[in-house]
Amino acid sequence: DGGITQSPKYLFRKEGQNVTLSCEQNLNHDAMYWYRQDPGQGLRLIYYSQIVNDFQKGDIAEGYSVSREKKESFPLTVTSAQKNPTAFYLCASSIDRDTEAFFGQGTRLTVV
Amino acid sequence: KQEVTQIPAALSVPEGENLVLNCSFTDSAIYNLQWFRQDPGKGLTSLLLIQSSQREQTSGRLNASLDKSSGRSTLYIAASQPGDSATYLCAPYSGAGSYQLTFGKGTKLSVIP
C-alpha cells in the first residue's frame, strides 16, 4: 500500500528532552511537510522540504529541527527549546509543491 | 499573509439534506485549493483539489467550486449521510515565497440519522 506512515502514534516527553517524530512515504513524492495542530486553531506549517538535502522554515520553526537525507524520510525533532510542544503533529507529502497533498495519521505528543 | 476563514464553524443537519460549506481566503494569488476531511484524532483525507484555472471539481456526492478573484470556495455535499460527520478543512496553496497550504479552522459537520 502506498502512503505516508507516521510513528509513533502517541509520544510522551519529559521536560528538557529532545524527541524525534518519524515520517516515511513510499509515494515517490519530492515535497514533504510538517504541520502542527492545536485545539481551536488551524494547522500551522513547521518545516517543508521540496527536495532531498533541502528544507525551509515554516511559520513556527523555532524549537524544531528536521533533516531530509532520503527522499522517503523527513524526521522532525522537537527540541527542549520548544516551550509548548504538546500538540498533534501531521506530516504530508506531494509530488511537487503545488500538487495534491497527502497526510499521515499524525503523532500526538504530550509533555509529562 | 494568507488568511482562511470557514463558515459556519459547526453545522448539524438531518440525514439526506444537501449542504454547503464556505471558505474564504484573503490572497487570491493561489496555485490551487484543496478540501480535506478530518475525523477525530486522525490525519487529513484529501477530498478534492481544484487548480487555480478551474471553476469546479466533482467527486461522487461532493462538488467544490472556486472563485479565485473573490477569494471564495464552497464545498457542496449532496444527500448527506451519518458517515459524512467530520471536520472539513479548506486549504489554498500559495506561492510567491511562501509555498504552503494555509488552513482554516474548519467546519465541524454532524449528520443526524
Image (cartoon, grey):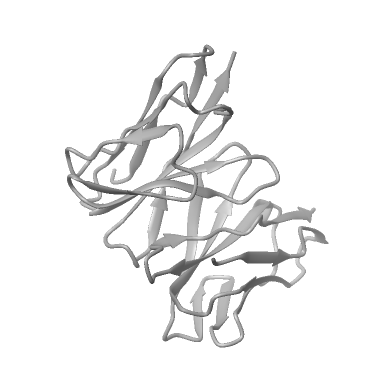
User: Compared with residue A70, is residue A51 higher up or lower down, i.e. above or below?
Assistant: below
* Residue A33 can be seen in this image: no
User: Compared with residue B1, is residue A53 higher up or lower down, i.e. above or below?
Assistant: above
Q: Which residue is drawn at 55% across and 81% down?
A: B66
- Give the percent coordinates (x, y) of residue A14: 52, 11
Image side of residue B60 versus residue B53, left or right:
right
User: Compared with residue B107, is residue A86 higher up or lower down, i.e. above or below?
Assistant: above
Quadrant that contains the N terminus of chain A: top left
Q: Which residue is drawn at 81% across and 61% down?
A: B13
* Residue B37 can be seen in this image: yes
Image side of residue B12 versus residue B90, left or right:
right
Quadrant that contains the C terminus of chain A: top right
* Quadrant in the rendering for residue A3: top left
- Give the percent coordinates (x, y) of residue A84: 59, 28
User: Compared with residue B6, is residue A105 higher up or lower down, i.e. above or below?
Assistant: above
Camera-nearest residue between B12 and B83: B12
- Give the percent coordinates (x, y) of residue A72: 22, 41
Image side of residue B113 versus residue A96, left or right:
right
- Give the percent coordinates (x, y) of residue B59: 50, 71
| Total marks in image | 0
Camera-nearest residue between A22 and A81: A81
